[in-house]
Amino acid sequence: MSEKYIGRSSQIAARVLGGEMMVMSSVDSTFFTLNEVATAIWQAADGRTPLTEIVVRNVCHEFEVDLETARRDAEQFVSELSHHGILLVSDHPFDMSAGPVEAA
Amino acid sequence: MNQQHEIAIEIGGMPILFRTHDFSFREMMIDRYGGFIGFLSRPTLEFEVELVTPSGEMESEEDAQVEMRDGLWHFRRGDFRAQWDPGAGRGYIRQSANPYSVDSVLRIVHSLILAGKGGFLLHAASAIRDGRAFLFSGISGAGKTTISRLAPPDVVLLTDEVSYVRREARGYHACGTPFAGELARVGTNCSAPVATLFLLGKGSENKIEVVNTAEAVRCLLRNILFFAEDAELVEMIFRSACDFVDRVPVRRLTFVPDTRVWDLIV
């Protein structure tokens, strides 16, 4: 399975309030509240770190979750947020300000 | 010569001048906006109102569309077309001689101006008691008009439909609006610091419950009047909603429709 790289879209507004990360798409006004694990993934989404590495380092290690469960949950989270354009996903590293470049 | 008639409508301390050639239209506006008629000498912005015979196109049920093109805001709905140049502070409205089109333009313009200043228009009744403002927010049928109708004599009603929330240095102020709901009565033109936002719901007993932060932001965003699909504005509204929830207590108010609910509003 190929590696995934995730980055935060520039077309969002986000803020931590009451200990919770809130994210809103400025494209379709979709509003999300992220739990602790999702927040950890969100904050590590720099476009350059492989998703697997984020899961191992920021989820399994910090929250004592087994790799299989953590990876499955992370895939689902990434899929949902990327569907709303909140997370950008690519199979190669990318600069978040420019967004992922589609392979030719 | 075709004489021009002017009227300034002042909401939230912001007078907007309307200019028309039709004297009876101006009189109709004076009747409708009663306590919100402001001074003509210092308008924030000005609109020329061109009254036209309604065409088939202008009688459609089209929803309001608001978009920014080439530095100008364009508003259109079935019953009107309008343009506003925010740089020059001028615009025009083309509509038939009805009071509803200007009302919609006022809501749109104030929502855009407030968004840039950290405030918003909210689907909410609001009222002042003991120098503090209380907002009662909810969708249609949640009880905005009911709770307004039940208000005791010491309460000053600001609106039963659309509340005007202005960002101030030390928090938020609620201002009266002429935007009436089923009560069909314009609010009182005054303001006070916002003490609490209540999310309304009808139930079998009167009770107030704490609302968690995420739910408060979610409900607030759902009830903010928001016309333009503009990414920058969406972001401003989101930040305003978060800031508001950070500073103002948000509670869920479940109530039975009798006057005792106001015993809880202190």
Image: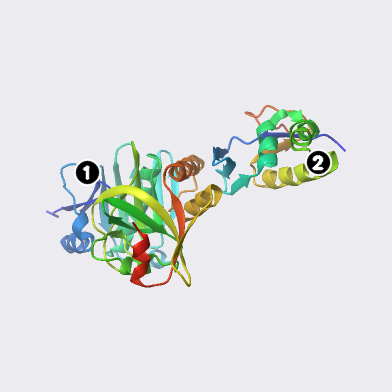
Q: Residue furthest right?
A: A1
Of the 4 image quadrants, the one containing the C terminus of chain A is top right
Q: Residue at x 29, y 40 (%)?
A: B89
Q: Nearer the viewer, mark 1 or mark 2?
A: 2
Graded by Cα atoms within 10 Å as few (under 14), some (14 to 19) or many (20 or more), the crowding at tag 1 reads some
Q: Is residue A25 left or right of residue B1?
A: right
Specify the subunit that label 1 lies on.
B
Q: CA distance from mark 1 to mark 2?
A: 59 Å
- Label 2 near label 1: C-beta < 8 Å? no
Q: Is residue B187 above or below residue B190?
A: below
Specify the subunit that label 2 lies on.
A
Q: Which residue is mark 2?
A: A71
Please name whichever residue, B47 or B197, is drawn nearer the observer in this view of the structure: B197
Q: Please name the amino acid that badge 1 sits on.
A: Pro
Q: Which residue is mark 1?
A: B43
Would you identify the image quadrant in which residue A90 lies?
top right
- Camera sees residue B227: no
Q: Is residue A35 left or right of residue B150?
A: right
Mark 2: secondary structure: helix
Q: How is the image coloured?
A: rainbow
- Camera sees residue B115: yes
Please name whichever residue, B112 or B240, is drawn nearer the observer in this view of the structure: B240
Graded by Cα atoms within 10 Å as few (under 14), some (14 to 19) or many (20 or more), the crowding at tag 2 reads some
Q: Residue furthest left?
A: B1
Rendering coords of residue B74 (x, y %): 40, 48
Q: Is residue B206 left or right of residue B91?
A: right
Would you identify the image quadrant in which residue B56 lies?
bottom left
> In this figure, what is the number of numbered marks?
2
Please name whichever residue, B134 or A91, is drawn nearer the observer in this view of the structure: B134
